[in-house]
Amino acid sequence: MVFVKVTTIGGGPGGLYASLLLKKTHPDWDVTVYERNPPDVTYGWGIVFPNRALSNLEAADPESHRAITEEFTRWADFEIYYDGTRYACGGNAFASMMRTELLRVLQGRAREVGVDLQFDQPVEDPAAHADDADLLIGADGIHSPTRETWPDAFGVQSIEGTTRFSWFGTDADFDALAHIFETTDDGIFCAHTYPGPTSTFIVDCDHETWATSGLAGMDESEYLASLEEVFADHLDGHSLKSEIDTWRTFTTIWNDTWHHDNVVLLGDAAHTAHYSIGSGTTLAMEDAIGLMNAVDVNGDDVAAALADYEADRRPFVEELQRAGERSRMHFEAIRRFFSLPERQRAVHHLTRSGRVSYESLLRRDPEFMATFDQWFAGQARDIDPDTLESVEPPCRQPLSIGGVTLDNRLVAAAEPTFSSRQGQPTTAQSDALVSRAAAGVGLVLTEPLAVTSRGRPTPGSAGLYTNDHTRAWRDTVEAIHDRGVLAGVHLTHAGPGAGASPRGFSIDRPSGNQWRPLAASPVTYGEGRTPEPVTASDIEDLIETFVTATERAGSAGFDYLQLHLGHGNLFASFLSPLTNRREDAYGGSLEHRMRFPLAVVEAVRATWDGPLGATAMAADWVPNGFDLDDAFVLAGTLAETGVDLVAPIGGGTVATERAPNLEDPRWYSDQIRNEVGIQTVATSHATTPDEVNTLVGTGRADLVTYYGQWPE
């Protein structure tokens, strides 16, 4: 076999474990680890192992697994404290051990199988080691010299967080993993603690608390004393221990590829996941298992082995990274969620990463969730929860919007169709909408209906701009009402996207009978026609057009009206700085860009007596475009204008958009609802009751668009 010399840079858990596994499997190989620190030096305190990882470690190397698990401290509860009030959810299988003990075990096991461990040996030139070895493993951490030797080849990217954190220990005893929140005059501090011979005690705070508290100007003794005072009720007289800990922000690292020639990255060198989900060490050791398996399968074909290793590990790692990023952003916006009632805030916190849902909590701790369900039902019905003899889950609880009460939290929102003739809905369209009402949702919402012929997205799109349309929709609404469900209408003007062929046939290409679209400015979307800029006269006409369509909606019997202000339509073209290049009173600042959409909202509000909603832009997904901070301003202004409900959506403004992995409608709904204090509908197309219960129960949304079966 050609593949005989392996060099590992970095003697942390990932590098040690990869080296001992390869040497154990191939005793005749030359495997060497270079570590810059002495063998008895380590930074950090405890390490958490989720239960799922233990079987993998046992299968890979039973000897080290046995030694590791002998050192474990185990627990089942996840505890959350809000200024002394405790919420505990059981059924969580976790274990921890000291990092020093883990390194001791792995160093001993590596020596036992014949790995050459070289301590106090910083590697100045990884490229030289790559030339000398058949395989070079870069396990050298978040600041990886190996990765930085070939930055273009690996395609490293990073996101720098804003929350400040530092890692301490304490002799105070803790029974379980706990997140302890303490509110002070300076802001909110959180301690992430878990038990062990020396308990781990990570402290973090958002950037506002960091700036206000003065921690940046304190030396170590001063900030330790300050934190001991903040968490005095939980330290039980014990002090905080420091190992030259520094306050820092968390950096999320990912790479376009994890391997280059005969060089491969694992652990933090390849990827990082936020410390609040406790997966860094586990990921590194599971990377080591994946690398060993790939090498065994591919023999002396280094390129194939490294490609297989990455292909196998990347999907799982990226999912954990996404969970970590959701958790990181949760802590960075922690003040936003402190407006939630404490019990709901605890469940919101437990589900922050997206890896835990309502149903998984229900399985783990039925009693904890039964108490929560009873509390939620009492809130929803405005009654004493103790008077409820039986309780249904959050998705089945009623909701009042603008004086109208929905029986449950499910919304059936119709997808755009293209079979209408001159805006007139077909029987098939009507029947499809009524069939959704028969599924037992609380609200049925039409597809976006154009308020003018010229405002239709396609020639086959439905509208509400003639008396015939009103009569047709009246029949549909009556059929929906017959099933005990409320009916909502969604009004739009496609603006720059008007008159295109349906996407299913020809994306953004002009159709044979296309009309010229309208927009804030003559900015073309994709391959469509350049729109005409809206004139002052057009604005007056369009306001009146929306008022007339609103009157038609009332005549048709709709219970709820929602205006569409996103996905690149007419209003979105005004709101986004990417498409609004006007120099008059409707362009420039956000306040001016909102002026026309708000004028329509005000006119509709003056005409419509029922609950009013708005599909609102949350982000353009393009640098320097409309973003979440703009969305907060828009949603807040909509609330002041009389809008009762916001349905946040992203993208659709320009063809160059790139949707982030994390910023989905559920996340937007969560942020806007809890920042602005307005009711929201998560436009997430949920297909299971669990999704709805998670979003509604945790306070991330009040309603959810739903495409599944009626929950049993």
Image (cartoon, helix red, strand yellow):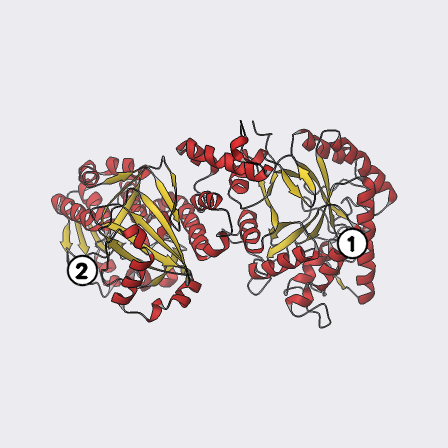
The relative height of residue 426 versus residue 120 in the rendered view (above or below) is above
Amino acid type at circle 1 is Ala
Using residue 571 as the reference point, say whether residue 186 is left or right of it.
left
Query: What residue does disc 1 label?
Result: 606
Q: Which mark is residue 354?
A: none
Please state, as top left, top right, bottom left or bottom right, where the C terminus lies in the image.
Answer: top right
Amino acid type at circle 2 is Asn
Q: Is residue 664 visible?
A: no
Using residue 62 as the reference point, say whether residue 232 is left or right of it.
right
Residue at 68% x, 52% y is 643
Using residue 202 as the reference point, say whether residue 537 is left or right of it.
right
Q: Residues within 10 Å of mark 1 (few under 14, many from 20)?
A: few
Using residue 514 as the reference point, say whether residue 685 is left or right of it.
left
Residue at 24% x, 41% y is 73
Query: What residue does disc 2 label?
Result: 37
Asked which secondary structure carries label 2, the reply is loop
The relative height of residue 9 versus residue 175 in the rendered view (above or below) is below
User: In the image, residue 594 lies at what x, y percent?
Assistant: 68, 63
Q: Nearer the viewer, residue 538 or 185?
A: 185
> Distance from label 2 to label 1 (Cα)?
71 Å
Q: Earlier in the sequence, mark 2 or mark 1?
A: 2
User: In the image, residue 123 lies at what x, y percent?
Assistant: 21, 63
Front: mark 2 or 1: 1
User: In the image, residue 6 lies at what x, y percent?
Assistant: 21, 51
